Amino acid sequence: MKYLLILSLFLSLDSVASEKQKIELPEVVKRVSSNNYKVYENALKVYQAKTNIEKARADLLPRLNIWSIAKNITDPTSILDMISDIAPFLVPANWFRLQEIKLLYLAEKEGYRALWGNEVHVAKALYTHLVFDERLLQHVQSSIDELDKIHKIVKTRETFGGAQPGTARDIEIKLLGLQEDEQNLQLLIKHEHDELSYALGYSSDTDLVLEPVAMPVFENLEPIQSKEYEFRVLSMSPERRQFDHFLSALSQVKKEIEYSFLGGSSMSRGVAGGIFDNLPSGNGLGFGNGASLKIIDAQKEIMKTQKIGVEETLKRQLRAVANQFNSDIFNYSNFKRRVELSRESKNALLRRVQLGENIDVLELSESSRNQIQAETALFAVQFRTLNSQDRFNRLIFNEDYSMNPPLIDSLKGGKP
């Protein structure tokens, strides 16, 4: 009885250790939005940047400090320090700093949207690649069974002199190659399962069971004209809009330095202000303002150049997606026809073998290999087209990407 209890305990532990979780492709967006670790981390950064605006506003309120007032009576030269301490709202640099914080918060939001879009796209691509590899594994396994049957036929024929010596050996080499492909695919699938479960925020002991993916109807697909979508890609790009906010914030940094003779700002730019950490700030005397402004102008030119680089990168990504998508839908009928012809050729040879005809068994083996390659190519183009469609939607922020990423208030409920 005691042994039965121990056995049942081990079985229960094993079931807990490998908890199965069914998931479908439409669930990926929701799961990434609410459980992805990078998305949650960046939602917190946006929250910090937003809260820093409230803190900066509060810091502009008057602060009555009796010691500063007394110091002003005894030391009239401390008037700027007193203004900064008692009435920070009278210091222009503080207002410019507040505007910087607002703009940097908007930049942080755009960066968060870009990261969210990338994480959703990566997770969806992982899902489709995993489904493709699982389907490819099944195809390889059925091909192994088929080639094994051919190998047995050849061995029998070789024994009775119906095939050239060494033919069975050559087919066995191909069979061993397919078995090696099977092992490599199984390892790859395990790795992809780990990557996908992490991207979706599942624990490491969760065993994902993926539902099949609906393939696009190729006959209904229209080519993508990349020139028609360039404006939309640029206008919808959070990466590009982020640079617009950075450039606007730099203008405020410049004003802050120009008016620093009335007092400098001690307010932090917050979590989103790290990009400006190496820029100079006014010291209140104004002697170094000329050099500081030149540094700001140079930084502005750097960011303008980076923005142009982002725009050119987006255009090229759009063109690459369009070219791949258009090529695949144009050649899809050829891929389908290739599968049909290779299957007919192999089946015709198999029928001749079953009827007892003396055929070249290497030709049969080659025919089987041609069918494997043709079907693999067809699978690949189907899933590649699916990924191209999703990549295109990511670039123009359409369909799953048209929504806004979740804010921290909606995420806090599901986190410790």
Image (spheres, rainbow, N blue to C red):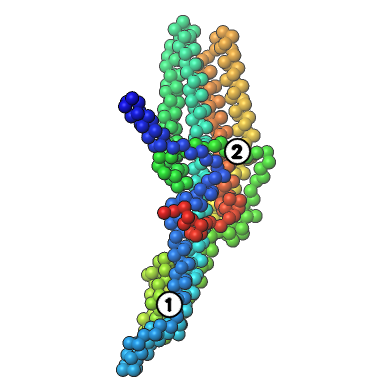
Label 1 or label 2, whichever comes before in sequence order: 1
- Bin the neighbour count of mark 2 within 10 Å (Cα to Cα): few under 14, some 14-19, many 20 and up: few
Counting from the top left corner in percent of width and height, residue 392 is at: 58, 50
Look at mark 1 in the image and give the residue it sits on: 59
- Bin the neighbour count of mark 1 within 10 Å (Cα to Cα): few under 14, some 14-19, many 20 and up: some
Please state if 34 lies on the left or on the right of 338 as rendered: left
Q: Amino acid at mark 2?
A: Ala
Eyeballing the image, is 297 above or below 351? below
Look at mark 2 in the image and give the residue it sits on: 214
- Residue at the right extreme, as displayed: 220
Q: Amino acid at mark 1?
A: Asp
Q: Is residue 390 visible?
A: yes
The residue drawn where x is 45% and y is 76% is 58
Eyeballing the image, is 12 above or below 295? above
Question: In the figure, residue 337 lies in which quadrant?
Answer: top right
Eyeballing the image, is 209 above or below 165? below
